[in-house]
Amino acid sequence: MFGGFLLAVMLITRYWYPIEGLHRYDFIFLAAIAFQVFLLAFKLETLREAFVIIVFHLVATVMELFKTSDAIGAWVYPEAYVFGIANVPLFTGFMYSAVGSYLARVWRLFDFQYSYYPPKWATVVLVTLVYVNFFSHHFIWDIRWVLLAATLLMFYRTTIYFKVISKHRSMPLLVGWFLVAMFIWFAENIATFANIWIYPNQSNGWEMVPLAKLSSWFLLMLLSFVLVTLIKDIKVRERVAKKETIDEATD
């Protein structure tokens, strides 16, 4: 809901924005805050999930400040704004936290369970390296492919079980992450088309974001997922099945 709302606001205001005296970027920022209040007020989001969004906002803003700095210039925000820090309008953190909001909510709604999930400490170490590489690859060797290989080795056996109506279904967790990363790539194309931000190759006119960006979004998906695990219990499927068997025997 949150991600879809942001995309809708971006597209609508791209073609129709009649409010004078309030920059479009600032309107998106205020609209994002208002929608978050709406989700909390109607209990569509919990306070714990809102905390995740704040963490995502902070982590993303630090990365945005670095990536959009004059020295790096990975992308730019071409329009004016008041609510912002340096080259970064404040609504940008909500684009990342929309991913965190989605993960935290579907985790609860679909009763996620796992088999062969690696130790949590190992996943935290992995995503710490992922986050550092987002910065360091501008100065030293880019180790994203090493990190992707490590991710495959760590999670290749991991299956996620998600409850649809009354039955749990399953898929490899890596496949689930790839599908979400693909969705984010589609959303990124919509956002750049709506002039929310532009990459250097789009400065003379919009063109599709290269598919190579999928590797970045997959790693961001991994980072987002592990951050959510810090406030969520990881239900191991084998233990759940064993408990159900014991309960049935007791009954």
Image: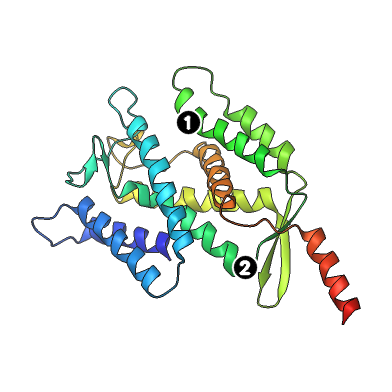
Q: In which quarter of the image is residue 115?
A: bottom right
* Residue found 58% across the figure and 44% down from its top: 222
Disc 2 marks which residue?
110
The spot of residue 169 in percent (x, y) is 72, 66
How many other residues sit within 10 Å of disc 2, few (<14), some (14-19) or many (≥20)?
some
* Residue found 54% across the figure and 18% down from its top: 141
The dot on residue 134 is 1
Q: Which residue lies furthest to the front in this view?
A: 250
Secondary element under disc 2, as helix, strand or loop, is loop
Q: What residue type is labelled 1?
A: Phe
Q: In this view, does 30 lie to the left or right of 57?
A: left
Q: Which residue lies furthest to the top in this view?
A: 140
Q: In this view, does 34 lie to the left or right of 237?
A: left
The colouring scheme, among rainbow, by chain, secondary structure or one colour, is: rainbow
Q: In this view, does 155 lie above or below 179?
A: above
Q: Quadrant of the C terminus?
A: bottom right
- Residue in the foreground of this view, choosing between 78 and 225: 225
The dot on residue 157 is none
* Residue found 75% across the figure and 43% down from its top: 156
Q: Quadrant of the N terminus?
A: bottom left
Secondary element under disc 1, as helix, strand or loop, is helix
Q: In this view, does 232 lie above or below 211?
A: below
How many other residues sit within 10 Å of disc 1, few (<14), some (14-19) or many (≥20)?
some
Q: Disc 2 vs disc 1: Cβ atoms closer than 8 Å?
A: no
Query: Is residue 188 visible from the viewing direction of this image?
Result: no
Q: Quadrant of residue 65?
A: top left
The spot of residue 100 in percent (x, y) is 48, 53
